[in-house]
Structure formats: structure tokens, C-alpha cells
Image: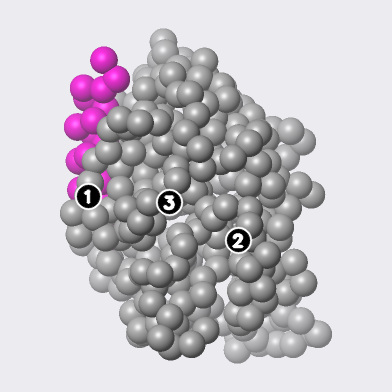
Amino acid sequence: MAEDVKPAAQTYDDRPVHVEATLPPEVQAPLAAYHGAEPPAPQWFKDAIAQAPERVFVESLGSKLEVLTWGEVGKPGLLFVHGNSAHADWWSFIAPFFAEHYRVASMSLAGMGASDWRETYSFTDFAEDAEAVSRATGLYDGGRKPIYIGHSFGGGQVFFAAVRNPERMHAAVMIDTGFGPPPEELAKRHAQMEAIRNIPTVDRPSRVYDTLESALARFRLMPPQPAGNPYIADFIARRSLKRVPLPSGEKGADGEGEGWTWRFDPNMWAKLDRERAMGGDPTQAVKVTTPMVHIYGAKSRIVEHRKSGAPSPFPPGLVEIEIPDAHHHIMIDQPLALVAALRTLLAAWPS
């Protein structure tokens, strides 16, 4: 794209693709400066990730789904759902703060993390997967239905499940959740995607990197933003990668025939009919009976999108909580503020 294209003029979309002008280094490659080393981390973060979850797989619709759990079965249930092309470990430094009072589960959606890939993806299937995970991990065993908490694309899944199956959840929390462009923009979007390098598409598979350092140097956030806390971005990035054979029998820098690539299904978006997820126009308000709150970052592009007058399916009067000095990826920018907001909210809501 031409350099005079301004990010604020872009329509928000949570797919792992962007059409930005040239990005500054701290946005384009936030981990490159560390050359594969782990950035220094504060003690609270070390303590949080030291509370290692139980890692299991739950069967749903013929697929094995990666699930992490904390806390005792028999306590009220919380289900955390990550954003697009992400994975369950995006919550591994957040979830432990709730383990004393809740049974907590974080799932990798089908096609992401270590969960199985599918031939097709749908919001209906994601909702069934969330129910299967909730049942299998004891989130109902605390005497009430679980509360779903979803970020970005995962927040879209939480919203859809709340509308479609309100009997399955006690309440719903969306975190910086937006909804994509109207159908008439899709052809234009596809053309823009084809003009971008290094982004997987239907006919362009994920790149294989010969070293972990080179793979980490390519990690960036979508939609683009600085990594507010590099130690969190690094933690997430390392768990976003998997070992795979290098193409054509090549040898990596370590002399092995394996390299690194991203864990998500690069064709997930092409296999998903997102625009008809609600059975109609996904940008029009729908009837909501589930108690619902939206938490967003003060600097988020989703806020820009909605303030510009873009339609949204959120119900009128939805309670919204702003996290100061946070972009879209609030758990990276302001993790403790997000924890505090969620803990305060859950202590008093829903009544």
C-alpha cells in the first residue's frame, strides 16, 4: 500500500492480515531486538506462569481440542477464549489470578494452538466446542453455569454462543471485541490480502523458519500495535510455534532437518463463513438475554471503528469498561489492570 495510507482510515478486522503502510520496528518486529533471548520479566509474571495448568485434550465434533485448567472442580466455572490465530496460553499469565475462587479453563479453538484442524469451521461448531470443554473440565460443577470470557475473535464466539445458547452460560464478558467488514467489502479485502507478503492464504502456506530466533523475529500482533510488555509477547510467541520439517530436505542452523512455523491453520479464515454467523447481518443488533459486559482498550482500533459509526450487533445500553493506555491486546499492554477489572466485575456481577 502507498505510504500515505493512514491506519485510522482502515476498517477494523480481526483476521491475521493487515494493509498498513510501512510499520515502525516496534510494531513490525517487536521481538527482533532480543535475538531469540527472553526479555526480562517482573516477578508477578514469573509467579503467575509458575502456576502451571493441567494440559488435556477434550473431544468435540470429532476433533481433539487443547485445554488448560486451573483451580478446583466444584468452584464456579470460568472459560477463557482467545483471539484469532492465537491459543490457550494467551491466558496462562491471567488465569492463575482466578484459580483460588474459580475452576478455570482456557481452550485453543479448533484450527489453533495444539487443537485439531478441520475441513470447515463455523461459529455454531465453536459454540458446541465451548460447551464440550465446559462439561469435560467441570465448569458446571460449582452449582451454576460457567461465565465465558473471550478476547477479540474469541469474544465474537462468546457473543454468538450467548445469543444462540443463553441457557449454557451464567454471563458473558467480551474483551476488545469487534466485528468485521460488511459483505460488499470482502472482494476488496481479498485483493488486498493477495498483495501482502508473509501472510498465509489459501494458496500461500505458513513459512518455515530455520531457527527459533528468526521465527520470533517475525512475530507481530494483528491488528498491528506495539507489544506493550515484550516479555508477554515473547511468552505468547514461543507457544505459537511448532517444529516441522524444513522444505526440500534442507538443514537448519542446528544441523537438524526441522524448522519452526506457526501452529494455526493458515486456511482457517477461508474455511469459515464468518459473515453469516448470526444467520443474517452480523452487524445488526440482536436480542440478548445473557448478562453481558464489554471491556476495551482506550487506544484500541475497535473503538475507532465503532466511533466512526460502524454498525455493531452489541445490544443498546451494553455496559462497557475502558482500560487506560491499552491497545487491542489488553492482556499484553495492561495485564494487571485487566485482572483487576475482571476480578472487581466478577465480585459484584451479575447479581
State the residue position of label 3: 310
x 30%, y 48%: residue: 296
Per the image, label 1 sits on a secondary structure element best described as strand
Q: Nearer the viewer, residue 332 or 48?
A: 332
Question: What stretch of residues is rendered in magenta?
Answer: 332-351
Q: Is residue 21 left or right of residue 270?
A: left
- Residue 298 vertical position relative to residue 218 in the rendered view, above or below: above
Q: Position of residue 308 (x, y in %)?
A: 35, 56
Per the image, label 2 sits on a secondary structure element best described as helix
Query: Which amino acid type is marked by label 3?
Result: Ala
Q: Position of residue 304 (x, y in %)?
A: 33, 58
Eye-nearest disc, 1 or 2: 2
Task: Answer whether residue 342 is magenta in the image.
Answer: yes
State the residue position of label 1: 323
Q: Earlier in the sequence, mark 2 or mark 3?
A: 2
- Residue 40 vertical position relative to residue 46 in the rendered view, above or below: below
State the residue position of label 2: 185
x 65%, y 86%: residue: 252
Few, some or many residues within 10 Å of mark 3 (<14, 14–19, 20+): some
